[in-house]
Amino acid sequence: QVQLVESGGDLVQRGGSLRLSCAVSGSISSIYAMGWYRQAPGKQRELVAAFTRTGNTNYADSVKGRFTISRDSAKNAVYLQMNSLEPEDTAVYYCHAGAGYGAAEYDYWGQGTQVTVSS
């Protein structure tokens, strides 16, 4: 089992910045991928940024150059630095972890943190 707790969501103005944090606990050694997703009202959940199982990073085209995903293994945390925020970035942001136990793989999600960007 993996537990994820997000924090850092807030209301900001266009052009502002936020840093989201995801505290990770549980079977950390089983995690092979981690990332951030977001879901806006009436839309499907979408990938924002992620560390893949090969150690690479993926970003949605809409956030490239503005958002940066990072991690601190000593603190068991993953972060999402968001700069130059736009109203279109308004969404609930979820931390995700993919974990494997033998042949079985599982997806874990945090409870989400609200990011609202005003114009």
Image (cartoon, helix red, strand yellow):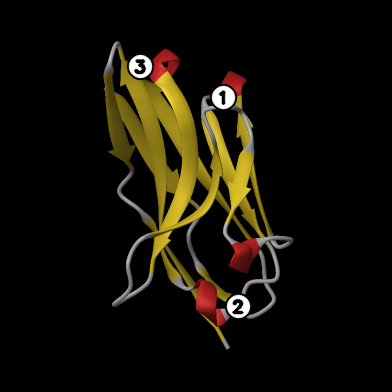
Q: Is residue 83 left or right of residue 48?
A: right
Whole-percent x, y for residue 74 in the image: 60, 19
Residue that lies at the very extreme toward the bottom in this rendered image: 119
Q: Is residue 11 left or right of residue 55?
A: left
Marks 3/1: CA distance?
A: 14 Å
Q: Is residue 32 left or right of residue 14?
A: left
> In the displayed structure, would residue 107 be above or below residue 7?
above
Q: Which residue is mark 3?
A: 27
Give the amino acid at mark 2.
Glu
> In the displayed structure, would residue 10 be above or below residue 100?
below
Q: Residues within 10 Å of mark 3 (few under 14, many from 20)?
A: few
Seen at 54% across and 81% down, the residue is 87
In-front residue for pair 10/77: 77
Q: Earlier in the sequence, mark 2 or mark 1?
A: 1
As helix, strand or loop, the secondary structure at mark 2 comes to: loop
Nearest to the eye among marks 3 and 1: give it: 3
Give the amino acid at mark 1.
Lys
Residue that lies at the very extreme toward the top in this rendered image: 102
Q: Residues within 10 Å of mark 2 (few under 14, many from 20)?
A: some
Marks 2/3: CA distance?
A: 35 Å
Give the amino acid at mark 3.
Ser
Whole-percent x, y for residue 40 in the image: 37, 71
Seen at 59% across and 22% down, the residue is 73
Q: Are marks 2 and 3 in contact (CB under 8 Å)?
A: no
As helix, strand or loop, the secondary structure at mark 3 comes to: loop
Seen at 32% across and 76% down, the residue is 41
Q: Which residue is mark 1?
A: 75
As helix, strand or loop, the secondary structure at mark 1 comes to: helix
Residue that lies at the very extreme toward the right in this rendered image: 65
Q: Which residue is mark 2?
A: 86
Q: Are marks 2 and 1 in contact (CB under 8 Å)?
A: no
Q: Are marks 3 and 1 in contact (CB under 8 Å)?
A: no
